[in-house]
């Protein structure tokens, strides 16, 4: 069974940084494309970014609102996905979900971790 | 990339069928057979219900079906049950230089 467990969320001041982690199990992590998707309060789902498997080049794509501030990485030896978030803004307040990517879409989802950016 | 257009709400009585639409463009919905649908109960993880327009992941009831015509995709829920009440989001691939795009979501109410 696929399990994705996010951690690292919390309250941070504008301009601050936070690193989210996603521990994966139940599938071959190194072969799997992964992504982060977020949902701001009262809003819909929004892509944050996607990282391909190393076998597929390891390419990372980011959504425009986070490009240059957020960094996605993966440690295949630890079956863990990361999201480094810098220069956080109030509009980054959201629940952040870790997902597998299959058939060009977020497939399996974690429970999410809340990031609140406020002074 | 603009969000896909969904109606904000839909409703039906138990046992009835309801269809939710998702309208995009020829650059996303109309250009690829990579439309997916998610069910999201507040406070829980979104769940993939349909992928590649009409395929169901293992464990998803066959009461859920998907289709596409031109730039508009649709999700039909037949035999509505109380537990189907949730928010539903569509998503589409939008080409190799894009992450893809989500719809704004539809709140389905079972009357």
Image: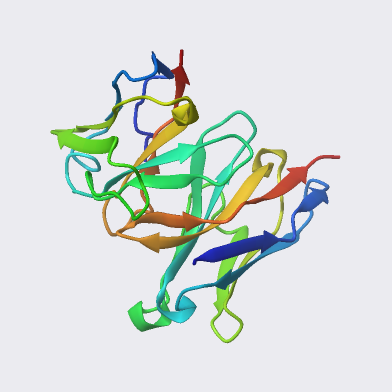
Q: Residue furthest bottom?
A: A77
Residue A93, how many percent across, how many down? 69, 41
Q: Residue furthest right?
A: A119
* Residue at image coords 72%, 39%: A90
Q: Residue B25 occupies which quadrant of the picture?
A: top left
Q: Is residue A23 visible?
A: yes
Rendered position, A55 above or below B7: below
Rendered position, B50 above or below A7: above
Q: Is residue B105 visible?
A: no
Q: Is residue A112 left or right of residue B81?
A: right
Residue B107, how many percent across, how many down? 47, 23
Q: Residue furthest left?
A: B70
Q: How many marks?
A: 0
Nearer to us in this view, B39 or A117: B39
Nearer to us in this view, B66 or B93: B66
Q: How is the image coloured?
A: rainbow
* Residue at image coords 19%, 48%: B32
Residue A79, how many percent across, how many down? 57, 78
Nearer to us in this view, B11 or A6: B11
Residue B61, how many percent across, how many down? 33, 42
Nearer to us in this view, B30 or B90: B90
- Please state, as top left, top right, bottom left or bottom right, where the C terminus of chain A lies in the image: top right
């Amino acid at each position: 069974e696929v399990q994705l467990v996010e951690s690292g969320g919390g309250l941070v001041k504008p301009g601050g940084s936070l690193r989210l982690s996603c521990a994966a199990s139940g599938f071959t992590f190194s072969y799997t494309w992964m992504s982060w998707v977020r949902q701001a309060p009262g809003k819909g789902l929004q892509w944050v970014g996607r990282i391909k498997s190393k076998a597929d080049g390891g390419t990372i794509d980011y959504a425009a609102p986070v490009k240059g501030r957020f960094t996605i990485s993966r440690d295949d030896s630890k079956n863990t996905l990361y999201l480094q978030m810098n220069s956080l803004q109030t509009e980054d307040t959201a629940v952040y979900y870790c997902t597998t990517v299959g058939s060009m879409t977020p497939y399996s989802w974690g429970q999410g971790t809340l990031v609140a950016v406020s002074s | 990339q603009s969000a896909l257009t969904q109606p904000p709400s839909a409703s039906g009585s138990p046992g009835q069928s309801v269809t939710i639409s998702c309208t995009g463009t020829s650059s996303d919905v109309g250009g690829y057979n990579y439309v997916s649908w998610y069910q999201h109960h507040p406070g829980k993880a979104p769940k993939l219900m349909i992928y590649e327009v009409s395929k169901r992941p293992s464990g998803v009831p066959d009461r859920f079906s998907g289709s596409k015509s031109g730039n508009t995709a649709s999700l039909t829920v037949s035999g509505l049950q109380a537990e189907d009440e949730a928010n539903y989001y569509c998503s589409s691939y939008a080409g190799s230089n894009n992450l893809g795009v989500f719809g704004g979501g539809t709140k389905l109410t079972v009357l």
